[in-house]
Image (cartoon, rainbow, N blue to C red):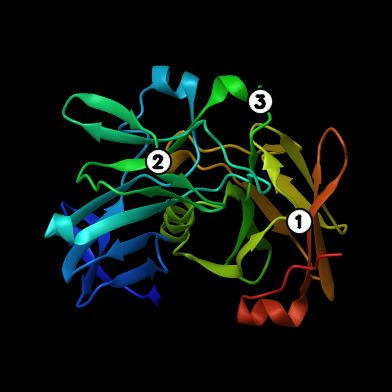
Amino acid sequence: MSISCLDVSHENKPGNRLNCTKAGSFRCCVTDLIFDVNAPVALIYYFDSWSQNLNAEHRKQWEIVGPLLNIQADPEEAVAAVHFPHFLCLEGKGCSEIYLAHFGEKGMSLEKPDSVGPYHVELKNLTSCPCGAVLKKSRFEGKIKSHAVILLYREHRIRPTKFHFYLLPNDSSLKQAVNERELQYHKVQNPSQTMQPLIIGSHFVLKSTPGLFTYPKKEKLQFKYPPTDRRIQYFELYLEFMEDVLELVLLEDNTNDLVWKAFIKKEELMYSHFHPMID
């Protein structure tokens, strides 16, 4: 069952509250968490910060593959299992190198999930400390495939038209962080997945119809998990004159493979929404 949750503030962090009045399985549309509960329970949960918990030494060994979430349940024993989201592309296979990282008073501890699915990892013993999915790097030799999304925002003023273009892992906490940062901009596109999974660490080139300029003038955008919420990389795009249609194309740098494209019609900008085109 999909659910919408009440916004709450917990320890000065924006969060969500869910009151389950009966047993069942409930999925949060904000965080993509799934709760299996066997009795009525009150849940408070919120995104936590990887950068404040996972130190530089740990990041050399472990790849972040999902949001870090802090969950509190009352009573805790009413929660049979929590399914934490991840953005790995497993291509129909399991993965023995996925762990759940917990952060408590003694630092980080690792736990094998009870099961691994295409989009979630299951944990049957809920803990109240921050928890999220990580992947052991050493076995993958830099070829970790992930689901990715494009976020695009337009500045309010008419001319020149300025856009912010983001390429991110499909992580609900990153999308929320960008939405909060871009409150002064119009959201042009709902999150849209790329045509294929992308390799973490790979580079991409953004092409467009004439008249669109990129700042900074570097030509490549690296696909990676940002070091902190405040350092999420994006392209800043400037368009002096809007023609009838603006085409945006994202290509993988080494192979020149097409991974995403979209056509923005002039009249659609009035509604701050457009649809990606996939061949």
Q: Amino acid at mark 3?
A: Gly
| Mark closer to the chain start, 3 or 2 | 2
- State whether residue 136 appears in this view: yes
Q: Where residue 259 is drawn, which disc sits there?
A: none
- Secondary structure under tag 2 reads loop
Which image quadrant for residue 75?
bottom left
- Secondary structure under tag 1 reads loop
Of badges 1 and 2, nearer the viewer stands 2
Mark 3 and mark 2: Cα distance apart in space: 23 Å
Q: Where residue 195 is drawn, which disc sits there?
A: 1
In the orientation shown, which residue stands out farthest toward the left?
75
Q: What residue does disc 3 label? A: 142
- Residue drawn at the location 63% of the way across and 50% of the way down: 148
Q: Position of residue 73 (x, y in %)?
A: 17, 58
Note whether 65 is above or below 245 in the view shown.
above
Q: Where residue 113 is drawn, which disc sits there?
A: 2
Q: Amino acid at mark 1?
A: Met
Q: Is residue 34 left or right of residue 241?
A: left
Which image quadrant for residue 190?
bottom right
Mark 3 and mark 1: Cα distance apart in space: 20 Å
Q: Position of residue 256 (x, y in %)?
A: 88, 41
Note whether 28 is above or below 168 in the view shown.
below
- Residue drawn at the location 46% of the way across and 64% of the way down: 184
Q: Amino acid at mark 2?
A: Pro
- The front one of 46 and 151 is 46
Q: Position of residue 62 (x, y in %)?
A: 47, 26
- Residue drawn at the location 50% of the way across and 40% of the way down: 65
| Mark closer to the chain start, 3 or 1 | 3
